[in-house]
Image: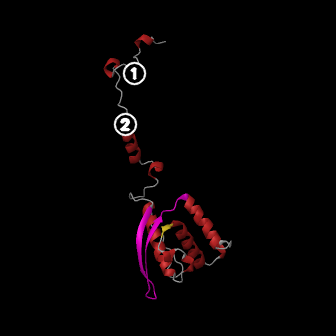
Amino acid sequence: MPNDANLPTIGRASRAETGVSVPPVPTLEAAVSAARASTSGPMQDRIGADGIGPEREFTLDYLDQRGRKWAGDFKVRVLTIKDTVQLGLVKARLAGGIPLVNLDGDTAYTLEVLAHLSVAIVASPPWAKDLLALHDAGVIGAIYEEVAKYEARFRGTKRIEAGGVDGIGT
């Protein structure tokens, strides 16, 4: 059993007295900075692949096939896991309880786009508050394209092109 008289007194002994090299205690600021610089998932989840955030603002400037201009400012967000679950519920509600596999491809894809936008859009111009009431599917496709490109950029993936209703996904 060691002799307690030979042990250094905690709190009063200096490094020189004990001969032990003790690293300095980091400040709170240094610890937070190190955590932010960490590449661990939990600390970096809200930062996209190239340092972008999970929200984006953009101005839509779209000219439809009838020569009508659709313009407005949008704020959208990259979907979280919770948002993805919400997207599935919205899609099911839009399908009226019909399994999506029983719908034709164009209808299923249109419901996917509308559900995605209903969850991803944070702010939009007044004309975009009820996308189901619009007659021009192309404008919906233009909005979705902006959202999908940003989400792919955030995640560091390439967007998979998919066909659908004229103007949506093309």
Whether residue 149 is situated above or below residue 170 in the rendered picture: above
Q: Residue at x 41, y 15 (%)?
A: 7
Q: Residues within 10 Å of mark 2 (few under 14, many from 20)?
A: few
Mark 1 sits on what residue? Answer: 11
Which residue is located at x 54 percent, y 76 percent? 131
How many numbered discs?
A: 2
User: Residue 12, position in %: x, y?
Assistant: 37, 19
Residue 10 horizontal side relative to residue 113, left or right: left
Whether residue 170 appears in this view of the structure is: no
Q: Amino acid at mark 1?
A: Gly
Residue located beneath label 2 in the image: 27
Q: Position of residue 159 (x, y in %)?
A: 46, 68
> How busy is the neighbourhood of tag 1: few (under 14 within 10 Å), some, or many (20 plus)?
few
Q: Amino acid at mark 2?
A: Thr
Start-end of magenta stretch: 55-81
Outermost residue to the right: 97
